[in-house]
Image (cartoon, rainbow, N blue to C red):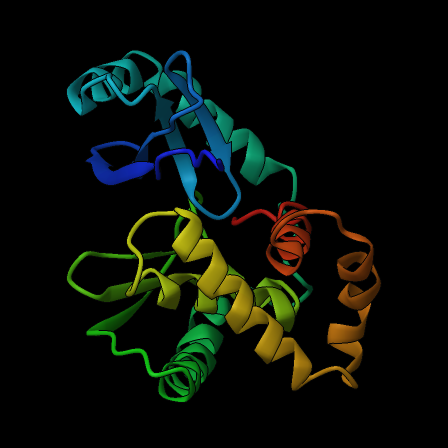
Amino acid sequence: MVYLCPPMKEKVHIDAVLGPVLLRKAPRSRRISIRIHPVKGVVVSMPPYVPYVVGIAFLESRREWAQAALQRMSARDTTLPEGESIESLRAAAKAELPSRLKVFADHYCFRYNRLTIKHNISNWGSCSTKGNINLNLNLMRVPVPLQDYVMLHELTHLHHPDHGPAFHAELERLLADHFSRHLEEEAFKAYLQPIGASRARYRITSVLEKALRTYRPL
């Protein structure tokens, strides 16, 4: 007999200081904890039996720590390319990302409501329950495969609002198809060997997420 862990339950809490915070009820959690994730931003994990309000209270008690952690994460990579500014990144993002997101959505049959280009240090993108997608203008500072990963990640949330097994399975399938179309491009070749060597269950997702951690929103 195979025993499966119950899926994680998640919801997004909007903190006045930190912005969107992911509250996650994880079956294997034994206590409440906070961590800073390169894609998801601030994540509060808690045992399944703990009410969300308790998790929010814990977050509020550690808000200063979380804010400082976000600032430290940002400070690890604070150099803009010569001649670029936040406003130039914003202009580039608005000129390029909407059309590319639409191509992905049309190709993989996703329907989103609205796209907004934002500047924040807590996450690379987000997807609301209303089908609105936010993308960080700092995506223009990372390689194209990682930009694509974030966009496909947020589109997948249109079908799966949490980060459960169904979400990861669909995202991995989309990434595998996308990479198969770009195997000869130098930007994608850099990730092929790490993906092939990975032993993670979701190999492509794992490798791209690890690579994204080396970049920080400004």
Q: Residue at x 41, y 86 (%)?
A: 99
- Name the one closer to the observer, 131 or 17: 131
Residue situated furthest front in the rendering: 1
Q: Visible in this render: residue 86? A: no
Q: Residue 66 occupies which quadrant of the picture?
A: top left
Residue 154 locus on image (x, y percent): 38, 62
Residue 52 locus on image (x, y percent): 19, 24
**In the displayed structure image, the side of residue 171 where residue 182 appears, left or right:** right
Q: Visible in this render: residue 207? A: yes
Q: Residue at x 75, y 60 (%)?
A: 195
Residue 148 locus on image (x, y percent): 54, 71
Vertical side of 218 occupied by 72: above or below? above
Q: Residue at x 38, y 80 (%)?
A: 98
Q: Residue 196 occupies which quadrant of the picture?
A: bottom right
Q: Residue 151 occupies which quadrant of the picture?
A: bottom left
- Name the one closer to the observer, 27 or 163: 27
Residue 190 locus on image (x, y percent): 81, 67
- Name the one closer to the observer, 29 or 88: 29
